[in-house]
Every structure is written in C-alpha cells, then in structure tokens.
Image (cartoon, coloured by chain):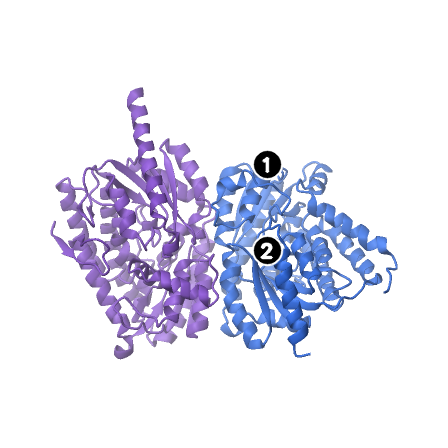
Amino acid sequence: MTTQTKIVTSRAPVKEAVKDASMVKQKEMMAAHYDRLTSAHETGDKVAATFVPGNLNELIMCFDLLNNLPEVNAIQNGLRRVSGSYVLEAEKIGHSEDVCTYVKSDIGMMAKGNIAPNGKKFPDPNVLLLSYTGCFTFMKWFELLREQYKCETIMLHTPYMGDGKITKNMIDYMVKQLKDEVIPKLERVSGVKFDIDRLREYLKKSTKAEDDLVRVLQSAKSKPSPIDAYFGGIYYIGPIFGAFRGTQDAVDYYKFLREEVEDRLAKGLGPVTPDGDMGKEKYRLVVEGPPNYTSFRQFWKMFYDEGAVVVASSYTKVGGVYDFGFRHNPDKPLETLAEYCLGVYTNRSLPMRIDMLVNYINEYEADGLLINSIKSCNSFSAGQLLMMREVEKRTGKPAAFVESDLVDPRYFSAANIKNRLESYFQMIDQKRAGVDAAA
Amino acid sequence: MATSLNPSATAGIVARASALFEDLSFTSAREWKAAKPGRKVIGYMPIYVPREMIHAAGMLPVGIMGGGDQLEVIHGDAYYQSYICRIPRSTIELGVSGRIDFVDGMLFPSICDVIRNLSGMWKMMFPHVYSHYFDVPQNYRDDIGGNFYANELAELRHDLGELRGKPITDDELRHSIAVYNENRRLVRDLYTFRAERPWQAPAAEVYLMVRAGLVLPVEEHTIMLRDYLAAARAEERPMRDNCRIVLTGMFCEQPPLNLIKSLELSGCYVVDDDLLLVTRWLTGDVEIEGDPLRNLSLAFLHHSESTAAKYEPNQKEKGQHLVRAVKRTSAEGVIFAAPSFCDPALLERPMLQHVLKEAGIPYIAFKYAENSGQMQPIREQAGTFADSIKLWSGA
C-alpha cells in the first residue's frame, strides 16, 4: 500500500504536495462530507454544529443529523489561508484581538457569507450541540453563534478532571443530562425518535476504528517511525475526531490506514512528507499543543528538513484519548459517551497531561519535548512552561518552546521558530554527545 | 457645601480596610490563625466558592485576588507566556514568595481555562497544601445540575472535615449560612446605598469595604460594614455633576484601586459593578431549615449573579442582568473594563454590547491589567464618555 499520489493542492506555495493513499482517501471523504453539508437545503437534511473535544457523532447520527464542526472549518480556512481575513473581519465587528482565533475565524466567515471549502454556502445549523468539554471558550462561542442563528442550543456540561479522576457524580451528571436534556431536545429538533440500539451499532463501529487508530499511532514506537504523529497525525485523526466516528467509512478508512502504515513499517520506511519520503530519522520528538495551520506545510518542513519526526503528540488526543485503553463501550452507551467526553486531553488536569507526555517520551524513546504554545488557546497554553520543566526533570530529556497561533497568520514568525528549532536540535546533539562521552 | 458630621468615623474605617488591602503578607489572617492552635485557613480565587462550608469547618476563608499593582512579579512571569492574563502569575508569585505560606488549602473555582489549569499547577508546586478545583454546574435543573452540585458540595464538606479532623455537621453549616446571609444583606445594603447616594460612598471606598471581607472573619466584616454604612450615611459629602455608570467585566483579575478612583475623578459615579462577586454571588438569603447542601445548591441554581463564566440557557435572558442593573440603579451608561487576555469577559463583551445597543444604553470599553500604571488614557476615555452622556443623553 505504498502508492503515493501527487496532487496539486490549492494555493500550493512552492510545488506539488506528496500525499499517501490514505490522505487521498481522507480528502475524498471530507469533500463528500462538505458536499452533503452544503446541499442540506436541497436534501432536507438537518445540521447539528458541535465541537471536536466531546464530539458525540454517534448520538448525532441517531437523529439523522449532519455534523458540522466549526473548529474543523476554521482549520480548513487556516490551511487554505483565508482565516486571516476572517479574523480581521471579526475584530472589525468588535471581537477582541486577545481571544481564540478559531472563534474569530468562524464569526468572520459567517460575516463574509459562510462559504464552505467547496465554495458553496454552509447551511445554518438547526441545532447547536454545545458539548462543553475541556475549553471554556466553547461555551461563549456557541452563545455567540446562538445569537446569530437563533436556533436551539443544547448544553452538555462535562465536569473537569481537576483531581485526576472520573467520579460517579460526574458520570451520573452527564448521563442525566444526556437522558433528560440532550436526547429529548435532539428528538424534538430532528423529529427522529431515539433508538439506543442504533447508538450501540454506531459505537461498535467506533471501537473498531479506534483499535486501528491506536495501532497506527503506536507504530511510531518503531525506529524509524513510519509516521509523523503530529503533522501526519492531524490527517490520521481527521475522520475519527470529525464527522465519521461510528460510520462504516471510518472503519474502512482506519483499516486502510493501518495496512498502509504496517506496510511502511515492514519496509522500514519513515513518514511521507509533502516533499516525499522523509530522509534519515535523526530526532524523535514528542510535541505538546496544536499546530499552526496558516503555515502548516512550512512549519512541518522545518522538522523533516532536519530529520526530525514527531513520534507522539498531545494534540492528536484532543478529540479522544484512546491509546491508554479507553474504547467506546456499546454495552453502556450513554455512560461511555460521558466517559469519552471526560477523558479528552484538554479535560485532563495538568498533572495528568504531564504524566501522558512523560509516558510518551519514555515509551516512544523520544529525544525530548517540544511545546508549540498557541497564543489564543488558554486551555492548552496556560501552564505549559511548568509542564516543560516538569517533563525535563522527570525524563532527563531536553525540552523547547516555540510560539505561534492556530489560524491567525500574524502570529507565525517563521524565522524565530526555525531558529529556535535549530538550536533545539543542537541541544539534543550535545546531550547525546554528553551521554556517549559518559559511556 | 455641607460638612461631615463626624469625618473621622468614615476615614478611620476606610483606613483600616485600606491597610488590609495593601498588606500582601495577609497579616490579619496570619494573626487569626496564630491566635488559637489548630486553626486553619483556606484560600480561594474568584469568582465564587461557598464560604459557608469553610466557616462551618471553623476555618478562615481568604480571598486570593492576585497581587495588585504593588507586587513585583519576579518568579510568576517565568510560569506564563506574555499572552496570558496577570492574575495567575501574581498568584504564583504570592505562593512562591511565601506570602501565603500560612494557607492550608486552596480552592480554584470553575471560571476559565487559566484558573482551571492553575489548580493543577498548585497541586504540583505546593503538594503539601490541600488544593481543589471546585466545579459548579452549567445545567440549572434541580434534578440534574442541582444534584451534581450538592454532591460536589458534599465532597468539599468531606475534604474540609478531614482537614480539621472532624466532620462538618448540618447544624454547623446552618449556622454558617445564617452568618453569611447577614453579611450578604449588608453588602447589598451598601450597594443600594451607593446607588442612591454615590457621592457619599465613593466606589474606591465601597471596594475597600467589600474587599476587607475577603480577609477578615465574616462576623468582624459584618460589623465593619454596619459601621461604615452608619458613618457614610451620617457624613455629608459634596455631590459632583457626575454621570452614573455600571462597571462590568472586572469579576476576576482586579483593577488597580487607582483605576476605580480615576473613573470617579473623570466624571463617572460607579453605581453598580461586578467586582468581588463572591461577597454577593447569592442574590437572596439561603434557606436555613432543611438540608443545607441542597439549600446552597438551589441558591446557586436559582438565585445567583449572572456573569460571563456562567452559561445562559435562555437567549432572551442574555445580557438582561446588565439592563436590569442599569434600570435598578438609574445608571446612564455602562463601562466594559476587562483584563487583557480575559477570555470570558472579552468573549462575552460583544453579546452584552448588542443587548445594550438594543436597549439604547450607551457604553464604552477598555482593557486593563492588575498592575496598569498609566491612568491618563482611561481618564480621558471615561471623561469623554461622561461628557457625552451629560451633553447628549435624553435629559
């Protein structure tokens, strides 16, 4: 499964980006989804907008609703380099320069016609499912959208794992919200009666896809790693974090992806980058924090040009943490949705997040930790400097810190980041030299 | 111009509150703790914690509101990027510098991602101090959010009971609820008095009076409030030709005292605000009879302040608390003052502004930090706002 397809991406800055077959497959899935969404007014399909962390796609599908994810739209706008104008538009109409740029990209996109990546207009959502998990901004974001769309808004409050554990009170609270608030309101909006067996069937499919995703992510324990678990990882999580978890499409995609990665693994190949196969793996990193999307390819290139591969990342756990054993459980359908929401990365306490990063560095035999701190994302960023020190202390591995933003191009300073990364790689070399000398 | 009947009474009370405010070593709370063996102090951050629970455990609740403009932040800045608000870094500074080393526990309320993450940092940096993220419901149904919250309260009650070595009884809690009901009534009286006669209760004085309640034992604070109200009522002060404004957005990181003074000096009487909400979060008396946890829970669900950290389930209600505050206090405008990088306040602001615009209420907006030193731009902005209200309002 090593077929690689050359595709000319829209607005490709330099040359064609190389994509492996799974990326092509995913691109087709995403395109089909956007077509479904933008033709909703013709097909009569109803639309639920919701968030990636705490995404209840299986439940949404039980009501024949299409899932539209404003975060994913903001990412698409970042990758297509239109988010900058949307952010400016939102600031022009009164939104602060200090707040989340996903929100401003979304608001700005609405103000400029709400055009989807396929060039057609997004439908207005019939319901905003405010599954409020791991980020306070979500709550305000959907209050802002509610003001605009004036549609039903359903709150599902996920308590924070401040003490590092999921309690019975948390699960009971969430299940009760699902039973008595979320489901009845979704029934009312959609006109579809809830069928718990239908939910179970979707959850079974989720579990299959989750198994394969974990196999893919854990392939990075091999040397060389056949995947990049941050830049490449963002492609891998797309379907399962988005509108496909619980679908046969997702099951098929993750089986296909797993086979593709296993094939690379068997051949001892490294990751596929936009410039083709990566050269010799020189540095193995764990990355904390989201990427910058407006200069995504340029950012990635700074890594693979130096032979640096990301073997594990926290961002690829933001829509669900599966690699420590959690799987959706069809036998306890509502409880499992609650447990899923509670366990997403940004809903975990800072000590839990540090434990995860330390675990990744040890398990994946990484050379160190890199934090990409996002200016407008307090959920991720607040506390990262302490995280960095703690991870260094516990692993003995060097850490580095760069800063950028999600989808605001004003906060991507290529020269600064490149300079910082090069210094970091030198630091790793020196550390290795010291270890070798000591040996 | 009328003269004060007893100018020293008000000034004396204000001077004491001012000394408490300026004391970044929390001497009064330290002295309270040292006065009797076994006493414990629990710190808490904005916006709200049920202080009744701490009081019922025989402990002193102490509000940790950051370091203000007098604290030099040296260590705290090493923990935060430049694009994160100021209060967590100065709170870290208070911790690392030993200024709050007498605190036996810290509560971090559910307010934003920064304070939320600070709760985890505290656990790591001060592992021998009880540290708890205090979650509150965003669902306001008795049988859903109410039950969740009552159970969260039960957990806190259990933890504080463990800390003192003896469970907290229902009767202890009922007594504490009664004590805090009285205190909240007086805070409300103070706010009502200021709304009626803002020239006799300047905003900076009211702030200091309320702020004193974050470090004093509640019984002592209640006496202080009563004394201040009596003194302020008795003292005639000159009425200026100021406009009347509601101040909003300051519910977490505190503005410098000079900022509050500057607003009045520039022509704006503050007749309502969202400063130090913990002192009046519950808007009516909490029921004393019956299950105290359920009573606290119901008060939270149905009789608590509206603020950006809360979800408003009803779109029609969004921002109406501000319109009501304007009407209740006969205010002529609203000043949005938010700390830089404050997600809740800044994300909320456009929605509130839309509501005010529809209601025909004028407003202005600016940002600050707890250590803002330059007041001139704020004075100019507030002064222009006051002038425009005076010149162009319906009157």
Residue for point 29% across, 58% down: A79
At which x and y percent is residue A53? 37, 57
Report the front residue among B136 and B249.
B249
The percent coordinates of residue B392 (x first, y second) are: 64, 76
Q: Pinpoint the chain carrying mark 1.
A: B
User: Up-down: is B144 above or below A213?
Assistant: below
Q: Which mark is residue B48?
A: 2
Q: Residue at x 68, y 52 (%)?
A: B211
Q: Are marks 1 and 2 on the same chain?
A: yes
Disc 2 packing (10 Å; few <14; some 14–19; many ≥20)? many
Which element type, helix, strand or loop, lies under badge 1? loop
Q: Quadrant of the C terminus of chain B?
A: bottom right
What letter labels the chain drawn in purple? A
First along the sequence among labels 1 and 2: 2
Secondary structure found at label 2: loop
Residue B204 located left or right of residue B334: right
Crowding around mark 1 (Cα neighbors within 10 Å: few <14, some 14 to 19, many 20+) is some
Note the chain letter of the blue one: B
For discs 1 and 2, the disc positioned in front in the rendered view: 1
Left or right: where B344 falls relative to A103: right
Look at 25% across and 71% down and name the residue there.
Answer: A36
Is any atom of residue B137 visible in this view?
A: no
Which residue sits furthest top?
A438
Amino acid residing under circle 1: Ser
Mark 1 in CB contact with mark 2 (< 8 angstroms): no
In the rendered image, which quarter is residue A145 located in? bottom left
Q: In the displayed structure, does residue B171 sit left or right of residue A373?
A: right
Q: Which mark is residue B97?
A: 1
At which x and y percent is residue B235? 84, 61
Which amino acid lies under the numbered mark 2 shown in the image of this protein? Tyr
Disc assigned to residue B229: none
Question: Where does the image place residue A113, in percent across and percent down from the top left?
Answer: 35, 72
